[in-house]
Image (cartoon, helix red, strand yellow):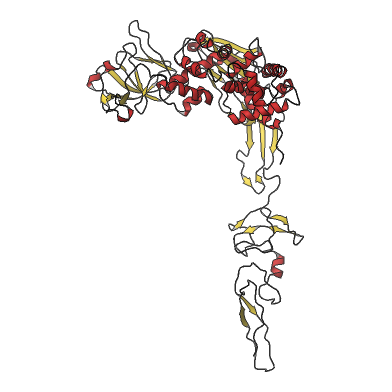
Amino acid sequence: MSRPPVGTLLDLLEPGWRRHLASGEPAGTLDVEPEMLDAVARALGELSRAEPPAVLSRRWPACVVVALAQITAHRDKNGKVWRAWHRASGSRATRRPSADWAEAFRGSLAALGVPAPAGDPLEAVLAHAAVTAPSLPEFLRLAGAGAPEQELAGLDPAVAALLRLPTGAGFVERCRALMTLLTENGEPGAGDLAGISLPRRIIDAARTAAAARPGPGGRPPLRLDPFGQGVLTRDVDRGADNAGPWTAILPDEITDPADPLLAFDADGELIWAVLPPEAVWLVHPEDRALRADTAPRILVESRLPLTWSGWRLVQLDLSGAAWLELAPAGDDSPRRRPVRGRSKPRLVTGAPVPGIHTTDGLPVYGRLPTVWLPADEVRWRVEVRRPGSSHALAAVQASGDRWDPQRLWDRVPRPVLGELVVTAAAMDTAHVTGLRRVVAVAESLDVSYAPALRLTGEEGLEPAEVVLSAAPGMTASPCAAKAPAEGDGGPRPWRRAARVPARGHWIPARRCGRRGCDRAGTGALEAGRISAAADAGHGERPWWCGTAHHRRCADRGDRPHRCFRTGRRPVAVRLRWPAHACARSHCKVPEGIFFRPGAASSWTRSPPALC
């Protein structure tokens, strides 16, 4: 059996990887299985023997970028990028092929509309690798410790090249957030890791780095009993397996005068840094009010023990808040606690138009997307442009506190149609994660189906009519179409003809669960084309059962000259033998003689004994 062409794998992976790179993210942030990466590298290496890499970069630009960047991230050692690539792809390790692949990488970025760093093409490969394996543990340790970008850039040339990308600062901030989750909140959930959008190789390396990092501040372990003893602690000097019991604690023993806010989740576990967007228990002084960008909803208010006099215990719903802090006391600046998922820009698209998508598989939205910015004083620049175009359709600068989402579309020609690249970048600081998304919009496009729910009939799914309703200024061609019945390629009646090789004519091919049943009903089983078995076994209806030929020729006992076929179910058959007279006129054979199958599974046909 011949294997499929090697280009088939690249054709399948190209659309998805192209969308990821068009959003501006480095190719090293994709989560690619090692086996898949090896297969793509070998496919590109095999194709490069027949065509130069420049030709491959025009047909599969995303595959070229992702394969080169991922091989560099996983297998590069001391900047030996091309040696690792030639070994993985099976191509010739000479200077000329290395230069060809370097130019192919830059050409692929240009074809995708992704800006490439100026200078050596090797720098572009290292930038999209998103930190190579040898320097990744130390990079995560420094990022988790809050090291500035200048210190991170001096760690490795690949990190320095990454930070020169427009999205490099956002990648570093996501790594900082990951280290915070692993060191301060314990093992995060799957939803928390998915929100950070980092590949598995970085998450596994961060777990290793976090295990060797000491916990924050040396605080004792804390728990909350909201309807009993209040804030509790225990002695862990004897080891985690034999820890002491939970006992009450005084506020002076655990709280910081500059930041006396304590946060606990719904199960009473302490939350060190990032607050979850859900119900949270908060313990704070009564004379310092809570502040947030939007007033959170109070769920429950409880009482603390008498030793916590002057403190308040309340449970708030933080699903709609972006940050939370205490009112300042004197000259001390309060510590702002961010809410997970609300500290960076968000793009709200709504529900897509049902059944409509682009040729690349992107869903099409009938309303304009909305950009939501964090409610703070950081100034943002929000832009909308076409993919691969340097001209911005709209550009707005505003702070999160004074942001109006509708301002972005005030000067855009309407209706909006096509793919859009929406970006949001912080202007005042580079330590804030931005936004870059590619969406397909057909403003005010509506589609209706008649019937709305297609039922299953005799020919498969029922046919339906599709009508597209476009906004004024936009034309849909065709505006209406008919969706044919969907089955197995054509009509599918419940009775179907099948060619029987033994008999050479057409008969209904249908199985029934009961012998002798020749009608549709709950006992009939639709089975499509059924092979005509001349000798059907017990419990299976033969192909000729119920036909006119069967009714004419079946041995019902009235034709003693016909033999029963082998393999039939052994039953007793009553034969009416004609009366036979012997030489003696008074002797006659009785008319009720029974014959049964013999030991050899064939029917005995011995004539009745005469007198």
Can residue 471 be seen from the camera position used here?
no
User: Residue placed at 30% from the left, 13% from the top?
Assistant: 287
Q: Position of residue 397 (x, y in %)?
A: 55, 9
- Outermost residue to the top: 331
Where residue 413 sits, quadrant-wise, is top right
Q: Where is the N terminus found, in terms of image quarters? A: top right
Q: Position of residue 369 (x, y in %)?
A: 57, 21
Can residue 335 be seen from the camera position used here?
yes
Where residue 159 sits, quadrant-wise, is top right
Where residue 53 sits, quadrant-wise, is top right
Q: Where is the C terminus found, in terms of image quarters? A: bottom right
Q: Position of residue 496 (x, y in %)?
A: 69, 54
User: Residue placed at 44% from the left, 19% from the top?
Assistant: 180
User: Residue placed at 69% from the left, 93% from the top?
Assistant: 583
Instruction: Establish if 383 lies above or below 52.
Output: above
Q: Nearer the viewer, residue 562 or 605?
A: 605
Q: Position of residue 350 (x, y in %)?
A: 55, 26
Q: Nearer the viewer, residue 456 or 229?
A: 229
